[in-house]
Image (tube, rainbow, N blue to C red):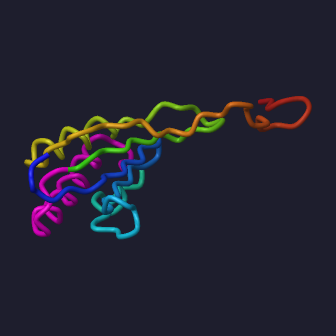
Amino acid sequence: MSSERWAVAHIFASHNNVIITVTDATGAETIAKCSGGMVVRAQREESRPHAAMLAANQVADTLKERGIGQVQVRLRGAGGKRGGNPGPGAQAAIRALTRAGILITRIDDVTPIPHDGGKPKGGRRGRRG
């Protein structure tokens, strides 16, 4: 890597919202954060790719002000017993960061994976209805 400053972008993309948090390398200091609900008015639009793109652009502007040009992306879906696929805004957020001029050096999927499985909802007879 060059001498340019870098950070870690944590993108949590569920099926209801997209949350982008940028921290330093240790994760101790938050540099920027934005979510889908902060950039759109309607609650139903929080998880959509357009909201993720707007949130990523807002984060990219903050990064440029601070002189950070490189990020490592840690992508996280809902995980656990809720399913491991990231929501629809994950790809849009990564694409928007790249288009804004932020160099992405690495993309890791850090979605929690159950090794034992949690107890599903619904009790003994399951969810009926």
Q: What residue is shown at x 12% (from left), y 54% (from top)?
A: 69
Q: Taking 6 as reference, is 99 above or below it? A: above
Expressed as whole percent of the image width and height from the top left, the position of residue 40 reads 29, 57
Instruction: Determine which quarter of the picture holds residue 129.
Output: top right
Give the number of marks. Answer: 0
Q: Residue furthest right?
A: 124
Q: Main secondary structure of the magenta part?
A: helix
Pick the residue in front: 81 or 53: 81
The part of the chain drawn in magenta is 45-70
Pick the residue in front: 106 or 80: 106
Expressed as whole percent of the image width and height from the top left, the position of residue 45 reads 36, 48
Q: What residue is shown at x 79% (from left), y 32% (from top)?
A: 127
Instruction: Determine which quarter of the picture holds residue 99.
Output: top left
Instruction: Assess whether residue 76 is covered by the magenta stretch.
Output: no
Instruction: Determine which quarter of the picture holds residue 121.
Output: top right
Expressed as whole percent of the image width and height from the top left, the position of residue 113 reads 59, 34
Horizontal arrangement in the rendering, residue 60 relative to residue 27 (left or right): left
Horizontal arrangement in the rendering, residue 91 relative to residue 95 (left or right): right
Q: What residue is shown at x 17% (from left), y 66% (from top)?
A: 62
Q: Taking 19 as reference, is 94 above or below it? A: above
- Give the quadrant of the N terminus: top left
